Image (tube, grey):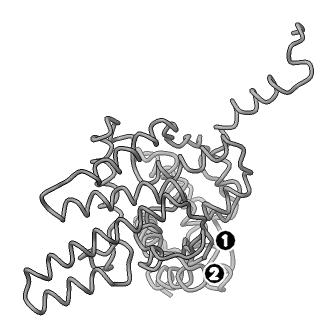
Amino acid sequence: MSAGNAARLFLDMMAAERGASANTLGAYGRDLDDYEGFLLTQGVGAGEAQTSHIRAYLAELSGRGLASASVARRLSAVRQFHRFLYVENYRGDDPAAVLEGPRRGRPLPKVLTLDEVTRLIETAHARAAEPLPGLGEQARRARTACFVELLYATGLRVSELAALPASAANAKGDAIIVRGKGNKERLVPLGEAAKGAMRVWRAALERLAAERAAKASAKAKGAAKEEAAGRWLFPSGAASGHITRQQVALDLKDLALAAGLDPGKLSPHVLRHAFASHLLAHGADLRIVQTLLGHSDISTTQIYTHVLDERLKSLVRDLHPLSDAGGD
């Protein structure tokens, strides 16, 4: 079997058995193309590659100036690929099994303070409430306010936010079901502020659709009504039918400028970090936060424990019976 065919079978397995997203499959595909391109320069294919070839590949990646995190990601793809070849009997050994990835420090996530999040939310709602001549800009501002409320209230990934169904705006209870990575579903609590922001946004979208329909041909009228009553909470003209992650990020940066914050400091993922960090800082259990974020492994959630340092110190200082003693 050629290396290219083996890689395609591996990607098919990742999609079918692990529910890997299109973005994940694309990243694995690029990494394996790069790896197999290197092996060709060594005169071998993936079926003949030895541990020494993989080590040489990692050395070349470092020589290209790739960060340790990028090298570790490439090695992860190579490891999983060779493990697949071994398990599926395409070769009798696994040359990547003995390799360790480069050590890397895990950067702390960027986190907004509670005051900064409050300023963002207040600015978003103030802008949405301003009287504006065009319904298009009014709807966009209502949508941005909805982004902020939802991201901070739920900790959703931006891909999860973008693909929320329109039915989320009509949730009867205090939670919605979100489909996350690997097609896994989880229940995400919703507060009144987030539900209210969704209702305001949908009302603004319906007004905009009605205005467009009034000005349009019969065919365009149907399209405008379909967009307002369609499948997605945040519909758009993109191929997916819903808003893109890039557009969400651009709208948030525009909001950051209006709120007097550094736009480079704000992204959908930063609001997800703020959600997790602020919950932990106010006493939430790490396992609960793991569930809310949709992390399959607790070690992923533990990156947020840096925010607990000051809280733990204050607990000892305030509650320990000897905290006022004059000892060392």
Q: Is residue 65 left or right of residue 175?
A: left
Callout 2, which amino acid? Arg
**Quadrant where the image shows the C terminus:** top right
| Residue 40 at least partly seen | no
Name the residue that disc number 2 marks.
Answer: 91
> What residue lies at 33% left-to-right and 57% top-to-bottom?
144
Q: In the rendering, at what x and y percent does residue 258 appear? A: 27, 41
Callout 1, which amino acid? Asp
Residue 92 versus residue 110: which sits nearer the camera? 110
Query: 10 Å neighbourhood of mark 1: few (<14), some, or many (≥20)?
Result: many
Q: Is residue 41 left or right of residue 6?
A: left
Give the answer, above or below, for where 66 lies relative to 147: above
Secondary element under disc 1, as helix, strand or loop, is loop
Q: In the rendering, at what x and y percent does residue 124 appear? A: 34, 49
> What residue lies at 47% left-to-right and 77% top-to-bottom?
170
Q: Which mark is residue 94?
A: 1
Residue at the farthest top position: 326
Q: Quadrant of residue 104?
A: top right
Q: Is residue 281 left or right of residue 253?
A: right
Q: In the rendering, at what x and y percent does residue 301 appear? A: 65, 53
Say whether marks 2 and 1 touch (CB < 8 Å). Answer: yes
Q: Quadrant of residue 203?
A: bottom left
Residue 144 versus residue 170: which sits nearer the camera? 170
Residue 253 versus residue 64: which sits nearer the camera? 253
